[in-house]
Image: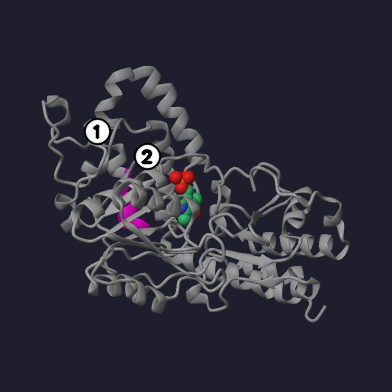
Amino acid sequence: MAIDHPLDEAAGLDAADPLAPFRERFVIGDPDVIYLDGNSLGRTPKATREAIRRVVDEEWSGELIGAWDHWIDLARETGDLIATEIVGARAGEVIVSDSTSVNLYKLAAAALDAVPHRSVIITDDDNFPTDRYILQGLAAQRGLELRTIRTDLDKGVDAAAVAEAVDERGALLCLSHVSYRSGAIADMASITATAHRAGVLTLWDLCHSAGAVPVALDDADVDLAVGCTYKYINGGPGAPAFLYVREDLQRSLRQPIWGWFGQREQFAMGADYDPADGVERFQVGTPPVLGVTAVREGARIIAEAGMAAIRAKSTLLTSYALRLAESWLVPLGFSVSTPAEDERRGGHVTVHHPDAWRIAQAMREAKVVPDYRTPDRVRLGLAPLYTSFTDVHTGLSRLRDLVADERHLSFDAKPGRVT
Ligand SMILES: *Cc1c(COP(=O)(O)O)cnc(C)c1O
C-alpha cells in the first residue's frame, strides 16, 4: 500500500465539518451499514415521518376534503422552495408534479410543438435511459430525427460535439447536467448558449444535480428542466418530480396533456381547456399530497443547510474518496471513472472493475451499500447531509479488504433484475 490513510484523518475531517449535525436529522437504522446510495434513494428525514403522520392523522383524518384548501397550493409552494433554494430559479418557475419521465415527455413535447418548422431532437448516448427512450418515442411519433452525440462514459458530455450537432434544423437539445454513471458535470451555461446560437431550445435533466451540485438555471438561461426528488432531496421512493419552465416561455408553451390542474380557474369547470398563465399550466391532475409533503420536508432541510455548504462538503467527500480509491483500490485492479477536477465532478464517485457486479454484491454482504452500473462500474453516492468522512473511510476499507481477500469471487457473475 503506497500511502496509508489513518482513520484519524477521517475523524478530523468530520470534526471540522459544519454540516455534521445534519446527520442527526435522518433516520439511521443500522449504524454499522455504510450507505453510499443516497444518489439512488436518499435516507428518511425524521421531519418527514412527523409531517406525513400529521397529514394523515390530522389533515386527512380530521379535516377530510376541507384540507384541500391548503393542499391545493402545496405543489406550487414546494416548487418555489426548490426554485429559489436548489436550482437557481425564481418563484413561479418550478412546480412539483408527476415523475421525471412524464415531465420530460410533457416539456419535450411542448418544446417541439413550439418550433414545428424544426425537425431534429439532439441528445447523447450517455443520457439516462428514460430520457433516451422518451425522446426516441417522441421522434417516432412525430416523424422527427433523433441525433445522438457520442459521449465518453468517463469524461461526460463534450461541448465541442454539442456545437457540431446543433444547427438550424435542431428543435430541442436534451442532456443530463450530471452524468448518472461517471458523475461528470456538463457545462450547462456554455452548452445552453451554444444551443441558443443555433436557435435550439434546451431541456436539462437535473436528477443527479438537484440537492448535490449548485444549479443556476436562470443565470444559464436554460429553457426547460426536470429533476427527481427521491435522490439528494430525500423525498422518498417514487416521490413526485419537479419541472422548470423559464418564466418568459411559459405562456407560449403548451404541454400535451390537457388536464384540469393546468386549467385557469380550475373549479369553474369550464367547457374548454384554457391553461393558466403560470407554471401551473404544466400540471395535469391531482397532486399526490403525501408525496409532495415529503418533498417539501426534504427541500426544507436542503434550504436550511444551504447549497453552497452542501457543495463544499460534497467536493471534500468526493476528493477524499478519490484519494482513498487511488491508494487502496487502483493497486487491486480498479480504475477511477470520475473526473479528477473538483469543478467537473458531481456528488458521486464511480470506479471500474471487471468484476464490478460481484463486488457490488459482496459489498452489500459487508454492509456497504453501493450501486452497480453496467457495464463494469461500482458507483459510490456520497450524500453530503448524512455521509461522514468516517463512512467513506470505513466503506472503502471494507471494499479494499473484500477484494484483496477475493471474497467477491463466491458471488454470482450474472446481474440480477434490479441493480
Ligand atoms: C433517476 C433518474 C431518472 C428517473 O426518472 P423517473 O421518472 O423518476 O423514474 C431520470 N433521469 C435521470 C438522469 C436519473 O438519474
Q: Where is residue 344 shown, x and y percent of the image?
A: 49, 74
Residue furthest to the right? 405
Q: Which residues are magenta?
A: 78-88
Left or right position of 341 against 146:
right
- Viewer-proximal residue among 95 and 390: 95
The Cα–Cα distance between marks 1 and 2, rounded to whole angstroms, is 12 Å
Q: Is residue 86 magenta?
A: yes
Name the amino acid type tagged 2: Asp
Q: Residue at x 63, y 57 (%)?
A: 374
Q: Where, quadrant-wise, is the N terminus in this rendering?
A: bottom right
Residue 259 is marked as: 1
Q: Where is residue 25 shown, x and y percent of the image?
A: 54, 47
Quadrant of the rendered structure where residue 85 is? bottom left
Q: Is residue 253 above or below residue 332?
A: above
- Viewer-proximal residue among 171 and 17: 171
Q: Is residue 349 visible?
A: yes
Secondary structure character of the magenta stretch overall: helix
Find numbered disc 2 in the image and state the secondary structure of the residue it sits on: loop
Q: Is residue 69 above or below residue 252?
A: above
Residue at mark 2: 98
Q: Residue at x 88, y 62 (%)?
A: 405
Left or right position of 166 against 315:
left
